[in-house]
């Protein structure tokens, strides 16, 4: 056996350079590069190995461990899970900062390789700097916090353990059914220890991502359910996007006159302009999609987890009359809602079903077209919302008193409505631009109002809805598709929570565009508390003397080195967007938008929340009564 003597870290980097994936006959490297923040624990191990020979890996210096991991996650998601970045951090707080990002990757089924440093395997100098101590076990370290948010987790305490651990990690990351974060914690002394590794371990290794074929039994069962239905509806989830099922979905929908509705992860798997695409489903869904789902007698879930937002907390469908058919590579997801499961690749399954359904047509007739036209009229109305100081009609059920809205208009020097600004952006930027969002009221507006007319240009992290993902993720988008304009659509609350990789984008001349919606507060949660009978309580950004905060975010961006704009009118916004497109460096457009000018839920958009059973507030009492009423008709499993 031929061997080569390497440190654990050198062996890691050598191995990463030799990992390839093959999908549909196309073969390419799986690991594009490594994000890093060096500290004790990884700088003398992995840092030395990268400096000595990084191979083809691109090395990017991050500014916050969570932020750079989010950039890596967004990259993998935009690349449809075909490529990844690895992430290396120091021990202690550096690795702890990965927990939120790992949860984000796990909730969204996104592969990413996390390489946090760990404490000493020998324990000789324990407790080392930044090491936690537990009385019940010396073996516990900060990295144990990553176990529940990792699809695969391991700790390396000897150099030779790296070999089996890496093979297992890559098996998990390249399996469409299990894809998620793989965490390999490497003891910091072991990172520098050497071992005589088998040379075969470093040979070119190809991971085949084959399309799982449906069985004859599954196809016959699916075809039987569809033929027996009169009003089937297809729910397009993220798995449809990763399967690249666009063309087969369109043919299926057109051939059998079946409407498509979308989850946040599935939006832009099929372009919004497709005539049978009725848009977002559920709590943040369109009126058209929710109406179709409520009338359906068969729901065909395609690569979806059926989260509470898509199902309106399992109240959207008529469970007495509606059956479910789930097409998913994950057996666990396929069983949801007591469905008939087809555990297979989405594109392959639809291609196989097409000839089996020859002659079938739903009874929707022209209703799909009329539902879509009705919704487009509502979208047009929301594009023209204007502020009136005397009797402003907001888009949500509850509102500030008129004088408070006027106070915001004066304090922020704006009368711009959020829906108007959002649709203006949609109508102005290039059609093939990619947008990203994650949290607040903006995801609801985007799922309802955004027209994604080019596939895979809508990037929403709504599995974890992680505030702070937005700006960091935009860097990942730019790395994935450098030729396109990329835009983060972010609220001021999320921007304040984390935007460190904006600086990384500027540092590496990766142009991103930050579209900052500033309503001086956590507007989405403020809506939530007021919708359920509470007052406006600690969700507005106010000073101790009750003055509305008016932060100059444009000046902050200018200080970082970005091109900044202030746009508080439609005209200013259009002008800023057009100029930003011409820039060769990162930009930020600050928009002061009025609170309570986002879109509201439509029919079927109820959300099950922890409403107090006992309250002296009438609005809360009514919300609790409504909850009990809804739960009587909700599915419990």
Image: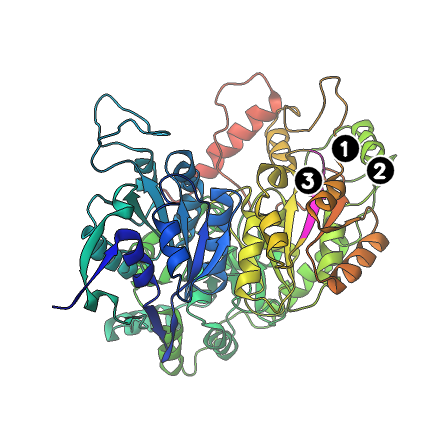
Sequence-wise first label, 2 or 3 = 3
Q: Is residue 141 visible?
A: yes
Q: Is residue 153 visible?
A: no
Query: Residue beneath label 3, please?
Result: 396
Task: Give residue 159's position: percent from left, percent from top.
Answer: 21, 50
Q: Classify 10 Å Cα crowding around label 1: few (below 14), some (14-19), many (20 and above).
A: some
Task: Give residue 339's position: percent from left, percent from top.
Answer: 33, 57
Based on the displayed image, in which of its 4 quarters is residue 434 positioned?
Answer: bottom right
Q: Is residue 522 above or below residue 204?
A: above
Distance of mark 1 from mark 2, alpha carbons? Answer: 9 Å
Distance of mark 2 from mark 3, alpha carbons? Answer: 22 Å
Magenta span of residues:
514-520
Of badges 1 and 2, the one in the foreground is 1
In the rendered structure, find residue 550 and report the number of the disc placed on it: 1
The C terminus: image quadrant:
top left
517 inside magenta stretch: yes
Look at the numbered disc 3 and give the secondary structure of its residue. loop
Sequence-wise first label, 1 or 2 = 2
Mark 3 and mark 2 in contact (Cβ < 8 Å)? no
What secondary structure characterizes most of the magenta part?
A: strand
| Residue displayed at 67% across by 68% down | 431
Mark 2 and mark 1 in contact (Cβ < 8 Å)? yes
| Residue displayed at 63% across by 32% down | 526
Task: Give residue 571's position: percent from left, percent from top.
Answer: 85, 55
Task: Give residue 21's position: percent from left, percent from top.
Answer: 34, 70
| Residue displayed at 57% across by 40% down | 498
């Amino acid at each position: 056996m031929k061997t080569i003597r390497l440190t654990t870290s050198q062996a890691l980097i050598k191995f990463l350079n030799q990992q390839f994936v093959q999908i549909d006959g196309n073969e390419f490297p799986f690991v594009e590069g490594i994000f890093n923040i060096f500290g004790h624990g990884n700088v003398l191990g992995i840092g030395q190995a990268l400096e000595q020979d990084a191979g083809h890996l691109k090395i990017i210096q991050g500014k916050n461990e969570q932020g750079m991991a989010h950039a890596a996650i967004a990259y993998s998601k935009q690349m449809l899970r075909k490529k990844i970045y690895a992430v290396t951090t120091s021990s202690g707080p550096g690795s702890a900062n990965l927990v939120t990002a790992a949860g984000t990757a796990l909730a969204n089924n996104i592969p990413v390789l996390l390489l946090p440093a760990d404490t000493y395997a020998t324990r000789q100098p324990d407790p080392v700097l930044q090491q936690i101590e537990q009385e019940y076990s010396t073996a516990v370290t900060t990295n144990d916090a990553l176990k529940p948010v990792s699809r695969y987790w391991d700790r390396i305490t000897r150099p030779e353990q790296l070999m089996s651990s890496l093979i297992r990690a890559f098996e998990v990351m390249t399996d469409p059914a299990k894809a998620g974060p793989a965490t390999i914690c490497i003891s910091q002394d072991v990172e520098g220890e050497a071992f005589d590794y088998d040379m075969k371990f470093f040979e070119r290794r190809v991971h085949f991502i084959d399309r799982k074929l449906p069985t004859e039994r599954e196809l016959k069962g699916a075809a039987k359910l569809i033929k027996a239905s009169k009003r089937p509806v297809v729910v397009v989830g993220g798995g449809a996007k990763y399967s690249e099922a666009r063309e087969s979905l369109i043919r299926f929908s057109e051939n059998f006159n079946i409407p498509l509705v979308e989850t946040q992860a599935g939006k832009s798997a099929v372009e919004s302009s497709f005539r049978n695409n009725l848009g977002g489903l559920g709590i943040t869904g369109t009126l058209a999609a929710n109406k179709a789902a409520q009338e359906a007698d068969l729901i065909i879930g395609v690569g979806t987890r059926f989260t509470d937002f898509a199902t309106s907390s399992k109240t959207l469908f008529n469970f007495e009359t509606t059956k479910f058919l789930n097409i998913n590579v994950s057996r666990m997801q396929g069983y949801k809602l007591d469905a008939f499961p087809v555990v297979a690749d989405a594109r392959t399954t639809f291609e196989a079903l097409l000839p089996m359904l020859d002659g079938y047509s739903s009874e929707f007739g022209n209703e799909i077209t009329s539902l879509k036209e009705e919704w487009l009229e509502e979208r047009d109305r929301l594009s023209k919302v204007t502020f009136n100081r005397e009797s402003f009609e907001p888009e949500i059920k509850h509102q500030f008193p008129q004088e408070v809205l006027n106070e915001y208009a004066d304090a922020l020097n704006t009368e711009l409505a959020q829906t108007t600004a959002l649709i203006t952006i949609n109508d102005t930027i290039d059609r093939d631009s990619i947008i990203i969002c994650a949290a607040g009221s903006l995801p609801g507006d985007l799922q309802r109002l955004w027209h994604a007319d080019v596939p895979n240009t809508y990037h929403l992290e709504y599995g974890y809805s992680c505030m702070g993902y937005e700006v960091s993720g935009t860097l990942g988008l730019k790395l994935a598709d450098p030729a396109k304009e990329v835009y983060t659509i972010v609220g001021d609350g999320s921007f304040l929570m984390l935007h460190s990789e904006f600086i990384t984008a500027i540092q590496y001349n990766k142009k991103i565009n930050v579209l900052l919606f500033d309503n001086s507060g956590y507007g989405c949660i403020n809506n939530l508390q007021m919708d359920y009978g509470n007052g406006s309580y600690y969700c507005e950004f106010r000073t101790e003397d009750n003055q509305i905060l008016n932060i100059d975010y444009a000046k902050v961006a200018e200080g970082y080195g970005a091109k900044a704009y202030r746009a508080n009118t439609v005209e200013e916004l259009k002008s800023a967007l057009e100029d930003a497109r011409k820039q060769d460096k990162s930009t930020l457009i600050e928009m002061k938008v009025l609170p309570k000018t986002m879109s509201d839920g439509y029919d079927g958009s109820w959300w099950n929340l922890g409403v107090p059973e006992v309250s002296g507030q009438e609005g809360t009492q009514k919300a609790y009564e409504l909850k009990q009423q809804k739960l009587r008709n909700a599915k419990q499993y």
